[in-house]
Amino acid sequence: MATAAPLQLHPDRLLPADPAVRDVARRLHQRVRDLPVVSPHGHVPAAWLADDTPFRDPTSLLITPDHYVNRLLHSHGVDLADLGVGRSETDGPLDEAASRHAFRLLCSHWPAYRGTPVRFWLEAQLAELFGVRVRPSAETADGIYDQVAAALADDAFRPRALYDRFRIEVLATTDDPCDDLAAHRALAEDPTWHGRVVPTFRPDKYLEVGAPGWTALADRLEEVSGVDTGTWPGFLAALQNRRDYFRAHGAVSADHSHADARTDKLTPIEALDLYDLARKGELTADEATALRRHLMWEMARMSSEDGLVMTLHPGVHRDHHAPTAGRFGHDVGCDIPRTVEFPSALKPVLDDFGTHPGFRLVLFTLDETTFSREIAPLAGFYPSVFVGAPWWFLDAPDAIRRWRSTVSETVGFAKTSGFIDDTRAFCSIPARHDMARRLDAGHLAQLVAEHRLDEDEATETIVEMTTTTPRKVFRL
């Protein structure tokens, strides 16, 4: 390892190349570098913090839960099973030999990550968190593995200690409506815990009334809520019951993702009739889509009444490779973006709730063409609408720069959501937020250099974007 290429993080990484602009960007980044992390949308399990169980090994921490890492390795021929993906509780964790083999696969494929944000995040984790000073490679893999494994044996690397080290102010999880939220309750009742972890209501599969297994989900909803879901009014009441339960446990938002963004309304009789057919398993595909779109309108109505911020990120072809989904399950990296339309799709909701003081809608997309053409103009008129930060595939330096430039010209900075890390990879959270802060510093520094902002305004703006804005948008 002594002759290996060094792993060095340049202090000016991602900052503008122009020396004059870079000086301003340095000062702006310095102002927000150590501010708290506000993470209003993510997928880290609350149980990690409630139980504070030490992380087992480098692979289960840095590789297995991160589908960004896994999907690129898979694209180069690595079997996801060799990375620990898709293992059930009965399978148990990878043994030491398998864990080390997975880490060797990552390191030997290190050139595959050149130019990607994944490399930025991984390098930051290895260097800043674990003190690694050599570049990953086939030759250095075992040494790096041993260094990370030794660190994980220290109490300073347990989940709660890392939560504090990362300066996390609030961390949102994403949860099934029927979850009992026991881990959240345990944290709330623990006098030794001083952080804030909030659940997020994610009802997607309960709204997809034509999907296989939906009837069983409706029955489960009835069991948990105590409300009869055999009727259309009962089903809506059961969903509201669970929303109330989530709110009582600290939830501030409801998250939604479907193939499109449509919110077409049905008449009460139409909705009732289609629901009856759904309970009988007799809906056509078109009827199921119609009822799901109406249910999205109902979700917006509920948000306007109970105050849960409605976040919407449609336009994903889930489980694009059916054999992979069948073998490993969902959320393993084989979801692919698709085009999506917003203005017509959201008109029913915005006609009814767009100016409602209790309604708040944050729009995310994987389709870059919609930022300046559709989403920013919607947020530039409707007080309830905010522009979600780039996420998934777009949470990369150049895409974030394009987004910030096109969106800010229409809505400024205050109608954006703040950065969203959207991750299951706990240790990547500070690296992802630092990337966003560096890119915002560069964008604002350019405005200062062009005399479109004074530096004191840029400083105030970047502080607001980092902490104040996400607190406000997500009612934190």
Image (cartoon, helix red, strand yellow):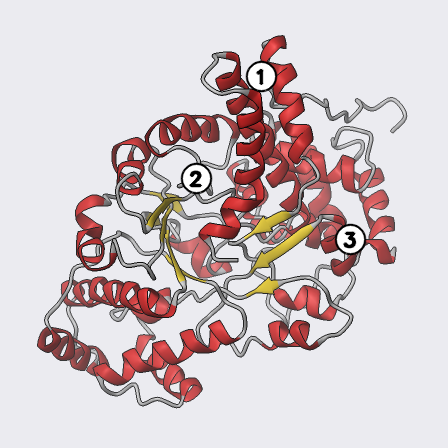
- In-image side of 89 versus 155 (left or right): left
- In-image side of 324 versus 15 (left or right): left
Which kind of residue does numbered mark 3 sit on? Ala
Task: Name the foreground residue: 413 vs 81.
Answer: 413
Task: Name the foreground residue: 176 vs 146.
Answer: 176
Return the disc, 3 or 1, that comes first in the chain's sequence.
1
Return the disc, 2 or 3, that comes first in the chain's sequence.
3
> Residue beneath label 2, please?
414
Residue at 76 percent of width and 28 percent of height:
135
- In-image side of 384 versus 17 (left or right): left
Which quadrant: the N terminus?
top right
Residue at 33 percent of width and 37 percent of height:
367
> Residue beneath label 1, please?
16
Residue 182 in picture, x, y percent from top left: 60, 77
Secondary-structure class at tag 1 = loop
Which kind of residue does numbered mark 1 sit on? Pro
Image vertical order of residue 226 relative to residue 48, above or below = below
Residue 217 showing in the rendered view: no
Secondary-structure class at tag 2 = loop
Residue 30 showing in the rendered view: yes
> Residue beneath label 3, please?
97
| Residue that protrudes farthest toward the top in the picture | 19
> What crowding class fits label 3: few (fewer than 14 Cα within 10 Å), some (14-19), or many (20 or more)?
few
Task: Name the foreground residue: 46 vs 132.
Answer: 46
